[in-house]
Image: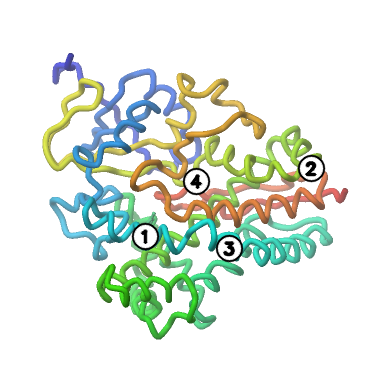
Amino acid sequence: MSVPASEVVRSDFDPFSPAARADPYGIYAELRAAAPAIRLTKYDIWAVPRFAEVKTIFGDHVNFSNAGGAGLANHFKEEPWRPPSIVLEADPPLHTRTRAVLARILSPGAMRRLADDFKAKAATLVDGLVERGSFDAISDLAEVFPVSVFPDALGIDQEGRENFLTYGAMVFAGFGPENDYFRELMAQAPRVLPWVAARCQREALRPGSFGAQVYEAADAGEISAEEAQLLVRSMLSAGLDTTISAIGMALYTLARHPDQWTLLVADPSLARAAFDETLRFDSPAPFVFRTTPHETEIAGVRIGQHEKVLLLLASANRDDTRWEQADRFDITRRLSGHVGFGVGIHGCVGQMVARLEAEAVIAALAARAKQIEITGDVALRDSTGLRALSTMPVRVTLK
Ligand code: OVV
């Protein structure tokens, strides 16, 4: 059965506007009730709000390509601002080869080798903060911890490390429309892009690090040296701003649900489950795009060739046909299959690093603080591609 063109549901919803980003959940519910695929007239793109179709599309890389770009820009029609990622913005067979290299480097064994160090660093940082009593959970914690562990794991030295964050911000702002926020970041491109390019070279990477291991895969003939450089760039793009946003959103969500914090304090082994529930409840990477290489359909809605398709992950994660009491934050729910990391061949390859970082921070805080109270105004960052806070003043009560 197919939906006649005259019955296609249209909406002027702008997912990138400050108002929509401030509180998108009411609109997401309306979109889910309206149709499986909705034409967003402002950008002439399709939006997919329900869990079922998001899941189906994640499983169908033939009809829904990543080579057309993971953001709003349509790489089938226009030149992107940076050379496309050879893992995120690629389809099989290229993607199969590059993904295999990253998946091996970011393996469960590698995580076990990092775990003790992450936990010790999180405990030291958190101890210092809780002893102060009041601190900013974003600028003193969420923005500090990943920077203290991930660049080291990647293998880059200290010099100019702040560029790492600016580059991540550029990449994620670059997934949305070209707005003032993106242009302000891009004004720093003359400094930041050469720094990134230099960090992606073999000589810049500490032996044994994640980055050096990418070059070992090149030595083994799995990828070329040019591809190695681009895969290190992927780690630089996706490895820091994401976990900062995710840890920040997790602390925000937990602080707003004191009953759930109490459960965590009683049993800090819930830290990992709590993190995943925060990814479902308020997804820090709220959407991602696919592009159609040819005409196709979404639940009976005809989609033309070279169309951008916006998968609303944060909406799918609140779909009450998939989740019991979807709008309820519950760290003890039997949670599997949320799409906060995506799923399928492009599902986040670094998700175990993200979980390790977040678990270390959340467990360290739950071990010391029996209460967290938000004591001042909370603000969202302007980024269109990530849902992240810039500030959240808190006061903690020691156990
Ligand atoms: C998942 C992700 C986000 C941003 C950039 C990249 C990947 C990349 O591969 O460059």
Q: Position of residue 133 (x, y in %)?
A: 82, 56
Q: Position of residue 368 (x, y in %)?
A: 82, 52
Report the coloring of the rendering.
Answer: rainbow
Three-letter amino acid code of the residue under disc 3: Pro
Q: CA distance from mark 2 to mark 3?
A: 23 Å
Q: Is mark 1 within 8 Å of ligand 1?
A: yes
The residue depicted at 68 percent of the width and 38 percent of the height is: 256
Note whether 22 is above or below 221 in the view shown.
above
Farthest residue toward the right?
399
In space, the residues marked 2 and 1 are separated at their CA atoms by 36 Å
* Left or right: 54 as drawn, with respect to 42: right
For mark 2, does the 10 Å Cα neighbourhood hold few (<14), some (14 to 19), or many (20 or more) residues? Answer: many
Query: Of 376 and 368, which appears nearest the observer?
Result: 368
| Element type at mark 4 | loop
Residues under labels 4 and 3: Cα distance? 15 Å
What residue sits right under mark 2 in the picture? 265
First in sequence: mark 4 vs mark 3: 3
Residue 146: image tag:
3
For the residues marked 2 and 4, what is the alpha-carbon distance in whole angstroms? 24 Å
Image coordinates for residue 120, horizontal then vertical, percent: 72, 65
For label 1, the residue is 171
The residue that appears at 20% across and 40% down in the rendered structure is 62
Give the residue type at disc 2.
Val
Amino acid type, label 1: Val
Q: Quadrant of ligand 1?
A: bottom left
Q: Which residue is mark 4?
A: 284
